[in-house]
Amino acid sequence: MKIERPRGTRDFLPDEMERRREIERKMRKIAESFGYREVMTPTFEHLELFTRKSGEGIVEEMYVFKDKSGRDLALRPELTAPVMRMFVNECSVMPRPLRFYYFANCFRYERPQKGRYREFWQFGVELIGSKSYLADAEVIILADKILKEVGVKFSLEIGHVGIMRHLLKPVGEEKASKIMRLIDKEDREGLERYLEEIRVEGDLREKIFSLVELKGDESVIDEAKEIVDYDFSYLERLSSLLRDVGVDFILNLGIARGLDYYTGVVFECYAEGLGAQKQVCGGGSYELSSLFGGPVTPSTGFAIGFDRVCEVCRIEEKKRDVVAVISFKGLESHAFRVASKLRDAGITAVVDVMERNLKKQMSFANEIGAKYAVIIAPEEVKEGKVAIKNLETQEQVVIAEGEMLKLLKFGE
RNA sequence: GCCCGGAUGGGGUAGUGGUUAUCCUCUGGGACUGUGGAUCCCAGGAGCCGGGUUCGAAUCCCGGUCCGGGCCCCA
């Protein structure tokens, strides 16, 4: 009986891997051009790292296990918490701000769907240590640039959870959090019911519903000012800066987060063509450091759903040029030696390992899309020469082995 | 966790409660031991798993698994 892949996991064949690596390479390059440096954290962590951040409820959606000493561990469901743990543990004296990026697989125990897998990849950044709107601006510009550069069609929505939190101050923190969660879920009926339950009525109730509906260009800030007495200059300066540098976005004051550690600006990117799982990027400013035993450290970051990007973006894989080294029976060692020379020169060279006849070797070279065949034949070997055939033009020349590199030209 | 639809060689498929499961493609070999894409020949390889109904099940029924779509969730 065959053994199948576990549910929600995927195999990636060479064509697809080349494409994924190409997309990954572009993302890395852009992040690095902004001064972000790669970090890596463990594939599994103490369960508590994630429950402290997101609550006990998420245990249901994680791969949780005990190790042989009975420790509760979990495969990472995301990377912000691990990166912040690392920051608290080992980065306390590094100059601020810190610019980190990561590209790694994550695991969630959820029902697989289009664009949702149990093992999936996230590309993300964390900009740690600045409370300025400039930090949010940089991170948004970076996310925007990456998605544009890989050819994703998306819309960017920016909100600010501080505004709603300010409005909700009178109801107390706990109730405010619950309200934020209901807003995040877009559960308007549930919100209605809850507000009734805790007897939030009249003016405040109206204001909550009005604020949630505010979505559009910067004019929504003026409308919001009518609703809540809050310092909007942060959002105004951010909006203005983003416009100045050519980032397209809309403001959506209805964006909330179900979790309490988001502190200010939050943003999301939605792509077309992904069905229900259309969010390709989510981010915002947060404060997790103190939750993990470090000093209060304002941070901002985002995570891109790499697999979703791969599904909708335009990037094609880069095919490697290949040279097939073909030899007659008895000349295999020559073939291996010639192949080795080509490889040393940076060329991908494949030799026959099937002990096939010449015709089959040629046929195979053709099938794998080799551009050249270097043919090792008895007559030429005697004179220290090889035959080089261009498989596209069918031209063939005999040349001294030492000269062969000159004839192998690849388009670029 | 819930709802809907699927599952036949590696890929794509046909078919019917009853001999040896169809075709295409593919893979390996040969025709063809100094040269690729063509052709021909030979070989290889399949009814998701478990249970039930039946003289007989790949086919009908039930359960599970996996895939696709949707809900929930989405840190």
Image (tube, coloured by chain):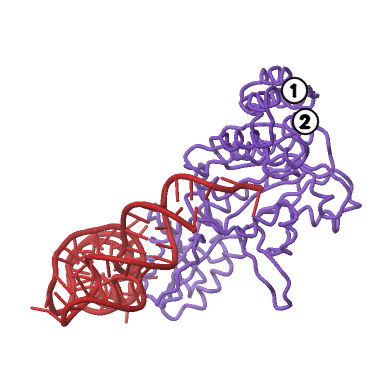
Chain colours: A purple, B red
Q: Is residue A37 left or right of residue A190?
A: right
Q: Is residue A299 left or right of residue A408?
A: right
Residue A228's disc is 1
| Residue B23 horizontal/vertical position (percent) | 18, 64
Residue A166's disc is 2
Chain ID for label 2?
A: A
Q: Is residue A59 left or right of residue A278?
A: right
Marks 2/1 in contact by CB < 8 Å: the verdict is yes
| Residue A269 horizontal/vertical position (percent) | 60, 37
Disc 2 on helix, strand or loop? Answer: helix
Front in this rendered view, residue B72 or A250: B72
At label 1, counting other C-alpha atoms closer than 10 Å, the crowd grade (few under 14, some 14-19, many 20 or more) is some
- Can see residue A30? yes
Front in this rendered view, residue A337 or A40: A40
* Among the 4 quarters of the image, the one containing residue B22: bottom left
Disc 1 on helix, strand or loop? Answer: loop
At label 2, counting other C-alpha atoms closer than 10 Å, the crowd grade (few under 14, some 14-19, many 20 or more) is some
Going from the N terminus, do you reach mark 2 or mark 1 first?
2
Front in this rendered view, residue A232 or A115: A232
Name the residue type under label 1: Val
3D distance between C-alphas at marks 2 and 1 = 8 Å
Identify whether B19 is placed above or below A278: below
Name the residue type under label 2: His
- Can see residue A407? no
Chain ID for label 1?
A: A
